[in-house]
Amino acid sequence: MLNLLKHLPDNAHVDDIVVGLSVKPSQITDGIALKTEHVTKIFDSVSGRVEALRDINLTVKKGEFVSIMGPSGSGKSVLLNILGALDRPTSGKVFINGLDIFALGNAEIATMRNLLIGYIFQSYNLVNRTTVQTNVKLPAIIAGVSPSEANFRSMKILEYLGIADKAKQKPANLSGGQQQRVAIARCLINNPSIILADEPTGNLDTKTGQDIFSMLNELSRKFKRTIIMVTHNPELAELTDRTIVIKDGRIDKEIIN
Ligand SMILES: Nc1ncnc2c1ncn2[C@@H]1O[C@H](COP(=O)(O)OP(=O)(O)OP(=O)(O)O)[C@@H](O)[C@H]1O
Ligand SMILES: [Mg+2]
C-alpha cells in the first residue's frame, strides 16, 4: 500500500491516485461519485441463508447528500459496508469515482478506501488506548503522510469541529457527541470525497444528534462532500437531498426531499 502512495504529494487527489492502480476508471465519471450495478449480498451460514441485498442499482451524484432508511435488518449497514469497500458483494459492481473498486486487489482496495472514503459508525469506533489527536491522525499516517503534516491537519480539523482542547485526552473521557466529532475528524483527515455514515446520531440525544447532523450538512453544502447517511430519524432524512428506502434487501422507493 505504501508503495503505491510514496510517489504522491500530501494533498494528492483521486486523479493522481488512480495513475498507479492496476485498474483504470472505466466509466464516465463526470458528476457521479458512486454507482452500483446489480449488487447482491448473500450470507450463507449454519443458521441458514440470508439474502441481505438484492439487485441494488444506485447512482449518487458528486456533492449529493443521500439518506438511507428502512426497518431493522433490511440491509442498510450491509449496503453501506459494500459502498465503503469494507465488504465484498456476492455479485454486482461498485464504481467509486468511476473506478470498479472490487476489480482491484485487496491491498489496493484498502488504499483506495483510506484515501477516498470517510466512514463514521454509530458507536464511534475510536481507539481508547491512545489520544484523540492520534485517533484522528491514524488514517493519515497509514496513508504515508509525514508526521508534521498529520499533526497540522489533525489540529486544524479538531479546531474546525470545536474540540481542539480535547486533543490530548483519551476518547473514553469525552461525551458521546464529542466522541462522534472525533470520529468525524478522523474520517476527514485524508480529505475523502465520499463520507459514509451509519446511524451517526443513533447513540446521541436529540440535541447532540442535531449538532452532529448540522456538521455533516455543512460538509455537504459548504465543502461539497458526497454523503450517504443511514438514519432511523425521518426528520433528519427529510433535510437531505434524497432518501432511499430499503426493504428486505431491495430499494423500495426513493424520495426527493
Ligand atoms: N456477517 C453476517 N453474517 C450473516 N448475516 C448477516 C451478516 N451481516 C448482516 N447479516 C444479515 O443481513 C441482514 C441485513 O443486516 P443489516 O445489518 O444490513 O441490517 P440494518 O438494516 O443495518 O439493520 P439495523 O437498522 O438494525 O442496523 C440481516 O438479516 C442480518 O442478520
Ligand atoms: Mg445497521
Image (cartoon, rainbow, N blue to C red):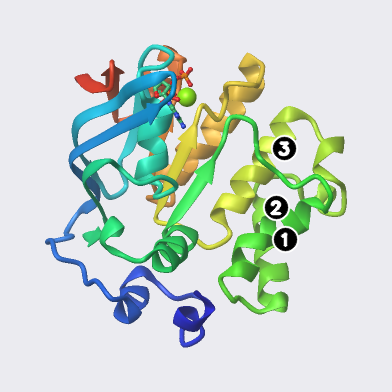
* Spot occupied by residue 101 in the image (x, y as percentages of width and height): 29, 58
Marker disc for residue 158: 2
Mark 2 belongs to which amino acid?
Leu
Foreground of the two, 210 or 7 = 7
* Spot occupied by residue 108 in the image (x, y as percentages of width and height): 40, 68
Mark 1 belongs to which amino acid?
Met
Q: Residue at x 41, y 13 (%)?
A: 234
Residue under circle 3? 179
Mark 3 belongs to which amino acid?
Gln
151 is higher (above) or lower (below) than 179: below
Whether residue 256 is visible to the viewer of this picture, yes or no, is: no
**Pointer 2 with pointer 1, Cβ within 8 A:** yes
Residue under circle 1? 155
* Ligand 1 picture quarter: top left
Q: Quadrant of residue 123?
A: top right
CA–CA distance between discs 2 and 1? 5 Å
Q: Residue at x 28, y 50 (%)?
A: 62
Q: Residue at x 47, y 45 (%)?
A: 219
